Amino acid sequence: MRPALGRHLLIVPLLTVLSVFFVVPYANMVAISLMEASHRAAYVPVFTISNYTSLIESGFTWGVIWHTLWLGALTTAICLLISYPVAWQMARANSRTRAALMILVIAPLLVGVLIRTYGWMILLQDSGIINQLLRAMGFAPLHLMYNDTGVVIGLTHVFIPFMVLPIASTIQSIDPELELAARNLGAGPWRSFRRVVLPLSLPGVMAGTVLVFVLAVSSYVIPQLLGGFTVLTVPVLVIHTISELFNWPGGSAFAVLFFVITALVIWFYLRTIGRVTHAG
Amino acid sequence: MTGIRLDAVTKRFGDAVVVRELTVALQQGELVALLGPSGCGKTTTLRMIAGFEYPTHGSIYLGDRNITTAAPEQRNCGMVFQNYALFPHLTVEQNVAFGLEMRRIPRAETRRRVGEILERMGLAALKHRYPRQISGGQQQRTALARALVTNPGALLLDEPLANLDAALREEMRFYIRSLQQEFRITTLYVTHDQSEALVLADRIAVLMNGVLQQFGTPLDVYHHPQTAAVASFTGLTNLLPACIERRSGDQYLLATRAGPLLAGGPPGLAAGAEVLLSLRPENLQLHPSAVVTDGSGCNRLSGVVRERTFAGSFVDYRVEVAGDVLLRVQAATGVSCQAGETVFVAISPPAAWVVPRGSV
């Protein structure tokens, strides 16, 4: 009993931090979302579900939610396509190459999100470096910013490490002899990958895709700066509702609603992938 | 008809020569053990046959087909890996079916062939289990079934018993041998365990530092080793420095520090050559000095018992002869000599074998 108790005590600091900085604010937000809005104070302490009913009844809300989920899914898919080969290389490379790749992959995280995003703006804007080059070569300029393209580029860039690292660590744990065994049994390189490495790396893919999706749908700075006001996502709209319209209950309700929807999406996703894995 | 043939195969990794000019031919249906200490190049040789490595020079043939540069999936060599390399996400049945699916065998036939071999290997009851849910011996049999079900042109086994406990290892030797006989499949069996090689193989190829030392039947390799290294690697032996006096019939008369001795050996050794005399401990007889034997055909060395260890089926003696040479003698428990006793060690000439003096 005693050692077990001692072990349990080890998680107390984290539990404290989580309750103070996570559970309490969220509980508070849920509470606020059930209060009446007011122009004189953050909220009026009168219980109502009107914040939710007006959200759910508004087509605009669902449009923004749908668009946010779509941008998140697109970012996740592109991240996965770019990251999987890198992760595979990283897992199968010698330690020196692996270290070099690791630094390259993590590099985007070494620069703060604002600076990195301004960097993208310099590259992507209509008079930016890419368009100057295109013009110099005689091509028509591309609209790469203040639209979905810009947002997806920015999000993909920053979230690649969150996709690469879990996938690489899963692939690294797959015995390379399994690939040789598959080849020995008559599978070419592609089939040995598809039948052996890919299914065994799915846990890493699951971790990476969920991480990137959650981070992408909840990011604020990148959609705000690279999307301008043409790309409306839930976080952008929540912050706008709270800080511009001073509608704390409305913003809170929107955040809570979106939290529930995201959780459902991820639950469905994990369940589907889980079924596929067990069937294969 | 040859099953597998290696023709002057050399493999270099950078500056290191791992396999040097290896030429070996396995007959169709023959089981050859590739025996050697770790790092001798035996696993590299196997991987070159499987196609996981390519030779720097030389050619590899499977039957009449030159497979030197063929991709692994085009070789049709079944392989059993040391750690079995079973697919952890597939059941026993799916593991065994994998090779047939890759060959696009019709589903009904796949099912039939997988069912048959699972039955033959005693795995039918486990076919829906995953590899992690079965024992080491069962994993071993699954790996064998997976390799054999495709009717490969040859079977490659990489230290297949190394991960099993001693009792099971003993049992699996006979199992693998009878399976190989049943399938009449040309088999290359890589091992560092000489007793495994002696028990299992039709012929043994002894590889050391990438060089083939000897290729012959277990009897031949054990009793007539061609180098001192082979003599000491294939079993316990005493190596006694000696000098050839002359050839007498099919034997050599040798001068040793312990006196003149008669011994067998490869033909062609010149008088005056410095050699080593290999004496297997179990081929030496120990006689108390009081017992007078007629000594005909027997070489006798006089010595003193320094140590006596009971080892179950025999007694292990260390006998000092010629002042400073310690001989190990393993005698039946019936003979009993005590430490400190003066004894005769009797060596029948066929049991003594001359090997060239070289690096051990």
Image (tube, helix red, strand yellow):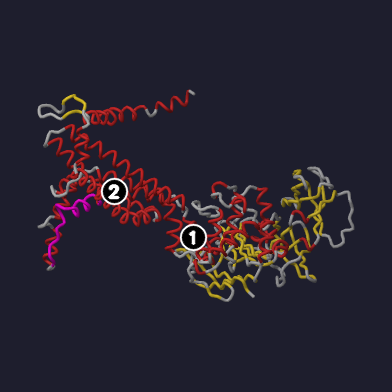
Residue contact at pointers 1 and 2, CB within 8 angstroms? no
Q: Which residue is mark 1?
A: A180
The residue positioned 80% from the left and 58% from the top of the image is B347
The reply to whether the magenta stretch includes residue A149 is yes
Report the side of A129 relative to B360 (left or right).
Answer: left
Q: Indicate the position of residue B110 as horizontal and vertical percent values.
A: 56, 63
* Total marks placed: 2
The answer to whether residue B140 shows anywhere in this view is yes
Type of amino acid under label 1: Leu
For disc 1, the chain is A
The residue positioned 15% from the left and 47% from the top of the image is A225
Report the side of A276 relative to A152 (left or right).
Answer: right
Relative to residue A181, is residue A241 depicted above or below? above
Report the side of A84 relative to B5 (left or right).
Answer: left
The residue positioned 28% from the left and 55% from the top of the image is A78
Given residues A190 and A278, the one toward you in this image is A278
Q: Indicate the position of residue B92 as horizontal and vertical percent values.
A: 56, 53
The mark that comes first in sequence, 1 or 2, is 2
Given residues A140 and A251, the one toward you in this image is A251
Same subunit: marks 1 and 2 = yes
For disc 2, the chain is A
Given residues B124 and B339, the one toward you in this image is B124
Q: Indicate the position of residue A280 as horizontal and vertical percent values.
A: 46, 54
Q: Which residue is mark 2?
A: A106
Type of amino acid under label 2: Ile
Labelled disc at residue A17: none
The answer to whether residue B274 shows anywhere in this view is no
